[in-house]
Image (tube, coloured by chain):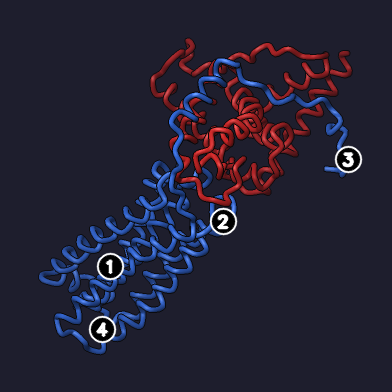
Amino acid sequence: MERYVEGSPHAFAELYRRVSPNLMGYLLRLTRDRGRAEDLLQVTFSKVHRARASYLKGAPVLPWLFAIARRSFLDERRAARSRNEELSSDGVVPEPKAEPEAVSNDVAEAIERAIDGLPEAYREAIQLTKISGLSIAEAASVLGASETAVKLRVHRGYNLLRKSLEQFSRSA
Amino acid sequence: MSEKDPLDDLPWPKPVEPGDAVSESIRRQCTHALIPTPCVRAHRRAALSLLLPMAAIALFTFLAILRGDTSDVVRAALYGVGGWALVIVVVLLGGLAFPPGRRPARRFRLFAALSIPVLFVLYITTTAAAHDSFSSFAQGATGYHAVRCGISCLMLGAIVTTGVLLLWRGTDPLTPGVSGALAGLVGGLGSALALGVACPSHEAWHVGISHGLVVVAMVGLGALVGRRLLAP
């Protein structure tokens, strides 16, 4: 990140190669829509590019990027709600449908479905810690919550996941 | 949770590669005419942030001295200013002088932003030289002076707070509201201390409302503006 701020295009390419899959996975989990996730990825990197001069040297890069991505998602969702777009007959913004992803087997598909079925707070905590690889402290700073709260969300999310997967294994 | 969780062995979803067109577009956008940008470190920004309230305090102390007001009250006020200026330094060092992610926990910074204004109001009201009844304070010339002083303090606080917020603009995507509140605390304290030195009134209601509540207002203003301004 520091070399990117100093003007190295190669440093940006390396940064993008390392973080974009994780950011994309996170945004896809939040939006459940590949098109929106890619739009938000563009918005996120556009903000990063504009704000690179205000990156404070020594700041952990991953939480910095994930926090910008999350804020971009929340801003976009707020804007969509204020435009009252795509309201269903009962007046609520419909949850986007999960995109059918290429899955290698039934278990992976069941996990995808189980994670998508979790409440948003648990889903986000599990995505950040388990899938995107952030530490509890980093996830807490991205979510603006205490570490205890994130641990609790992950733990509760795990319990719900376990129940879903037990049902899956029984039915299988 | 146990040490070895059976869920650990599950095939968790893999990170997702963005589409080639999107990646290419982002790369083009972010590397086009990429020039080195000056990157001011956190501790240097903190030092610059300290200059703003200190300049306000120095200016108003100079004005008080010019006016020939070197009484015990001014000396007492300056004694208090020394202590509270140290608080400003500690707030900047502990709350902002490190990059986001390396700062103290959000709850400690939030606690400082909420408790220090309360302590400041308690301090200046309990150490005030005079304690009148509210009705005598609110009437006539003293009430008018309190309004005028309060407006001056608010304006100075807004100027200092805006300066501090601009110094930290776009630097904190993690806790912009809390950092904004701390910037407001620095601006509010600087303003209240500056006006406190120059203000001829040392009555408890006056200093509590016209000087002390400005700090509370600046913390709120800093948190509100900081949420938008400090986030990239």
Q: Mark 1 points at which residue?
A: B56
Sequence-first tag of 4 and 2: 4
Q: Residue at (88%, 40%) from the top-left corner?
A: B4
Q: Name the residue under label 4.
A: B74
B76 relative position to A34: left or right: left
Sequence-first tag of 1 and 3: 3
B51 relative position to A3: left or right: left
Q: Which three-letter amino acid code belongs to the residue tagged 2?
A: Arg
Q: Residue at (15%, 85%) from the top-left corner?
A: B68
Residue A77 in view of the camera: no
Disc 1 crowd, CA 10 A, few/some/many (<14, 14-19, 20+): many
Chain letter for the residue marked with disc 4 in the picture: B
The colour of chain A is: red
Task: Give how far apart the Cα atoms at labels 4 and 3 are.
Answer: 66 Å
Q: Which three-letter amino acid code belongs to the residue tagged 4?
A: Val
The colour of chain B is: blue
Q: Mark 3 points at which residue?
A: B4
Along the viewing direction, whichever of B165 and B24 lies nearer the viewer:
B24
Q: Which of pointers 3 and 2 indicates the residue nearer the eye?
A: 2
Give the farthest residue toward the bottom: B72
